[in-house]
Image (cartoon, grey):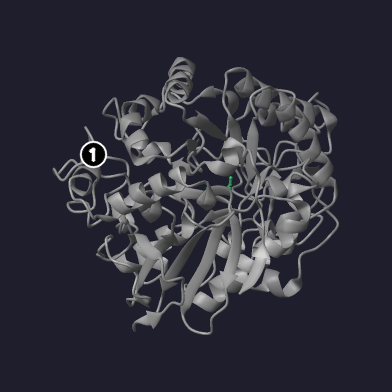
Amino acid sequence: MERSDSHSTESPNWWQSGVVYQIYPRSFADSNGDGVGDLQGIRSRLDYLEWLGVHVLWLSPVFRSPMRDFGYDVSDYCDIDPVFGTLADMDALIADCHARGIRLMLDWVPNHSSSDHPWFVESRRDRTNPKADWYVWRDEPVNNWLAAFPAGDRAWSFDPGREQWYLRCFLPEQPDLNWDNPDVEAAMHETLRFWLDRGVDGFRMDVVHLIGKQLDANDPDTAVERGYSHVTFNDVPVTHERLRGIRRVLDSYAGDRACVGEVYLLDEARMAEYYGHGDELQLSFNFSFLWAEWDAAILRAKVLATLNHLRPRNAWPTWVLSNHDVTRHRQRYGGSEAVARMAAVMLLTLPGTPFLYMGEELGLVDAEVPPDRVVDVDGRDGCRAPLPWTPTPDHGWPHDPWLPFVAAADECNVATLRERPGSVLHLYRDLLRLRHEHPELQIGEFTMIERDDNVLAYERSLGDRIFTIALNLSDSPSRLEIASDHRVLLATVPFDPSMPFDGMLPPQSALISTGT
Ligand code: NOJ
């Protein structure tokens, strides 16, 4: 066995002990029948989230936006878009969450605004206005960077008014803010304060590794030839100074406000840098792990690499498999419910903070979106399908939602699975409860059990209490050597809790055992 890591901490912060549930608000719950989810819809479903047992909600952006990137193009950082409700609705949601002991994180988009934002409208007017330098303007493109959308586009757009080019790492309607300008940095800090003053617990920070840039550094030619966007290459020192500035804003508030950064760099070593030395991001997403294949050796290597890079910094890992940008992990891993169940066990028992994406607790795959209903520029509609609440044809939505439901919504919906003990929904709930009841699974030491087969196995422990977690990804039974007093606490296949564990892991199954 390799005792590979220890992240024990006696009194964990909420963002360490909790489990985060990502809500994509457009697709969660619609209170006013316009086919788009909203804040009142979220409020009306807090009972469900409390029943499920999540402790933190992260809402994808709800700020004012022309919705060309469905909220990731912000035209007012300090207001709620009418499609989602009002500031009063947000205040009510914050209060309701807190009354239930649930924390709330908002999605903050610091790298770019909408081209409809008054800052950009002014900036593009001429070359001398007070906001002329709030975005990245040049007489000609100064590097070979490609934008993320539409894939293959140059990251520079020409503005006929100023007769200059502006940088936009995403859509032409998402111009990059110029963080080299201290006024921009100060204005963005103010937007954080606006929400911190209203009581939000923290932020998910969109592509936050992009707020520092080195414009004269070209991306590798080979990557550009293949059409790779600049986003995965941007990694420059000045960003860290800016993250420390952001962290100082958070730390100036009582109540342990926290952030998780979308650091879209695909290796653990570079991602780890964004935690700084306890003075930058409290949490960073781990995309290298998200993109790992469903294979025990690969997952084992990714987990160990993550921990090896974070441990020296005393940095807290995160684990995420699905979100609003990627094909849902059940589908990526082959589509079976057995895989969805095993992945849930892994996600909720690795050492660090798990992030769940709404609907994964129902075992959802992506919806099939016919060409005439495609709305996203980057093919991400499938994973954003509306959450099915009921088996009825409307699935609990008062009006036809903006995107189609998943094909399996008659079966995979909250009401049906909630009534079915043993369903994947109950598995998530049982896992959340187990994790909540046992600090070993939140803050315990982590030890990887080295094996040379398609079994991922590890231990979590505090003192003498050891939990063993094992996933058999193969199609044949496999033996697991554990102490003879171990009993199975939870498994993805039926088991008899009164019997000692016989050491055999059925194929395509996962279990958690402990000796007491
Ligand atoms: C990452 C977000 O997750 C994605 O949805 C968005 O399109 C880009 N950043 C641009 O903001």
Compared across the picture, whether 498 is left or right of 237 comes to: left
Most foreground residue, 481 or 365: 481
Find residue 301 and report its image quarter: bottom right
Between 299 and 190, which is closer to the camera in this rendering?
299
Q: Is residue 134 visible?
A: no
Quarter holding the C terminus?
Answer: bottom left
Label 1 environment density (alpha carbons within 10 Å; few <14, some 14–19, many ≥20)? some
Mark 1 sits near ligand 1, with its Cβ under 8 Å away: no
Disc 1 marks which residue? 400
Question: Which residue occupies the extreme left position in the image?
Answer: 392
Q: Quadrant of the N terminus?
A: bottom right
Residue drawn at the location 73% of the way across and 61% of the way down = 309
Which element is circle 1 on?
Answer: loop
At 64% from the left and 42% from the top, the residue drawn is: 10
Image quadrant assignment for residue 399: top left
- Residue located at (62% from left, 59% from top): 153
Residue under the image location 29 percent in, 25 percent down? 32
Q: For this view, does 263 lie left or right of residue 68? A: right
Residue 428 position within the rendered picture, expressed as x and y whole percent measured from the top left: 35, 51
Q: Residue 128 placed where, x, y %?
A: 83, 28
Image coords of residue 334 (percent x, y):
36, 72
Tell me where residue 167 appears, x and y as whole percent: 72, 47
Q: Amino acid at mark 1?
A: Asp
